[in-house]
Amino acid sequence: MLSRTKLSSMIGALQHSIQWPFSELHDIQYKNPKFTGSETIAIYCIHGTADRTSAFSFIAKNMIDRLPSSISSIELVSFEKRFQGLGIEQFAYQLRNKIIKNNHHKVILIGHSRGGLVATHFLTHLTQVIEKIQIIAVVTIGTPFMGSDLAIMPFRLYSKSIDQMHKGSAYLESLRKKMSGNLVPFFHFAGRQDDIVTVDSACPTLEGHTHIIQNNEGHLSLLHSDELVENLLNCLFEVCPTANPYQEEKDDFIHVENTILKDFKKK
C-alpha cells in the first residue's frame, strides 16, 4: 500500500502531467496588483527539461496577490529551439535577451530542475558583462547541482544540457566553484520524495546557502505545493525591501546555512 507521503507526491506529479499538453508556448506575465515600488523588481520563472511555460502557473497564481509591493511582476519564460540539443549556457543567453528586452534591471530568478542551472549560469557567467542587471536572489527547486540519475546514455548523446547534468560532470563542478563565495542569496528547495534529483544533489554544500527540504514532495509535485508557495513568499520578503504582512508565516521559515540540512516543519 502506498504511504500518504508517496501518494501526495504522485498526485502532484499527475496534476503537472495533465496540464502539460495545454501549456502555453509563449511567455506569460502576471502583474502584481499591489506593486508600488519606485524601482521595479521582476521575478523570472525558468522551467526545466522537456517542460513548458505553464510549469510555474500554480505558483504564480497563488503568489501574485501576496507578493512584496516592490515586485512588479512574475514572468514565466519560454525558450526557442527546444529539443534541438541546446546547452545550459544557450538557454541562459535567451533568458538574458528576454530580461534586456523587458527593460528589467533588478530581477529574482526562480528555476525548476534544469531551470535552476540556467538561472545560476546566468548569474555566474553573464551578469559580469551586463552591469545594468542586478540579481536580487536565486531560488532553485529540485535542481541537480550534483547531477541527475536521468542524465544517462543515450539521452546525453542528443542533448548538450542533459550531458551537462550527468553525475561527475565537469560543467557542474565548474558551476559549483563559481557559485562559491557569490554574495547573491541562494535558496535551494528539495523534495524528500524526489527520485530524479535527490536532496543531496539539490542542496549544494556551500556556505551561506539556504536549504528548504519538503518531506512530502517529489520532482514535479514541488511545483504544485501550497507549502512551497508559503516558503517562497518568505524567501521573497527576506530579500525585498518590503514589510512582511504574513509575519506569522515568516516565523515558520527555518533559515538553514553552512551545509546543515534540516526539514522544514510547519507549526
Image (cartoon, rainbow, N blue to C red):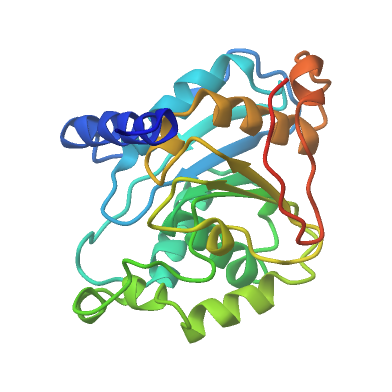
Q: In the image, 67: left or right of 166?
A: right
Q: In the image, 52: left or right of 220?
A: left
Q: Quadrant of the C terminus?
A: top right
Whether residue 136 appears in this view of the structure is: no
State the image coordinates of residue 226 (x, y, percent, origin top left): 52, 23
What residue is shown at x 79% (from left), y 35% (from top)? 238
Q: In the image, 127: left or right of 216?
A: right
Q: Residue 207 falls in which quadrant of the image?
A: bottom right
Extreme front residue here?
Answer: 1
Q: Quadrant of the N terminus?
A: top left
Nearest the eye: 170 or 66: 170
What residue is shown at x 33% (from left), y 46% (from top)? 78
Q: Is the residue 235 above or below the residue 192 in the image?
A: above
State the image coordinates of residue 15 (x, y, percent, origin top left): 28, 28
What residue is shown at x 44% (from left), y 33% (from top)? 5
What residue is shown at x 35% (from left), y 31% (from top)? 7
State the image coordinates of residue 183 (x, y, percent, origin top left): 80, 61
State the image coordinates of residue 56 (x, y, percent, origin top left): 41, 35
Q: Is the residue 216 above or below the residue 205 in the image?
A: above
